[in-house]
Image: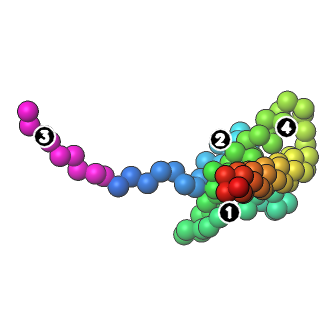
Amino acid sequence: MTLHTIDVIDIEPVEHFSFLEISKLCALSAQETEELIDYGAIKPDYSVNQEDFYSPQTLEILKVACRQRTDYDLDLFSVVICVQYLREIVLLKREIQEYKTVLRIHEHAL
């Protein structure tokens, strides 16, 4: 039996999405996506060569808000409000998880 070595190729996972990817994945026009940026609903994590890139979390929140837009026939400004509330919910869930972790650590210490 011969063992073969495999060369590891460094492939980076998709960590961020471009403006066009965000628009496409959320079924938004470029103009609608630009308006969401202007309203402050989404903000790029960074820019390279004048192209903005957004986090997966931003994409997921925006996708949920856009589904709400379709389901309830919301206007774009309502999507902005929805994004803001969804972002708050994500932050609150994260805080709850952190508190639960701290409680478990303290329970095991006792």
Depth check, mark 1 against mark 3: the one in front is: 3
The kind of secondary structure the magenta stretch mainly shows is loop
Residue at left 70%, top 45%? 60
Residue indicated by mark 4: 69
**Circle 2 SS class:** helix
54 in relation to 1, above or below:
below
- Which of the two labelled residues, at mark 4 and mark 1, occupies the earlier sequence position? 1
- Callout 3–callout 4 Cβ contact below 8 Å: no
Q: Mark 1 belongs to which amino acid?
A: Pro
User: Where residue 25 is drawn, which disc sits there?
Assistant: 2
Q: CA distance from mark 1 to mark 2?
A: 16 Å
- Which of the two labelled residues, at mark 2 and mark 3, occupies the earlier sequence position? 3
Question: From this viewpoint, is residue 79 visible?
Answer: yes
- Which of the two labelled residues, at mark 1 and mark 2, occupies the earlier sequence position? 2
Residue indicated by mark 3: 3
Q: Mark 4 belongs to which amino acid?
A: Arg
Residue indicated by mark 1: 44
Depth check, mark 2 against mark 3: the one in front is: 3
Q: CA distance from mark 1 to mark 3?
A: 46 Å
Q: Mark 3 belongs to which amino acid?
A: Leu
Q: CA distance from mark 3 to mark 4?
A: 55 Å
Image quarter where the N terminus lies is top left
Residue 11 appears left or right of 16:
left
Image quarter where the C terminus lies is bottom right
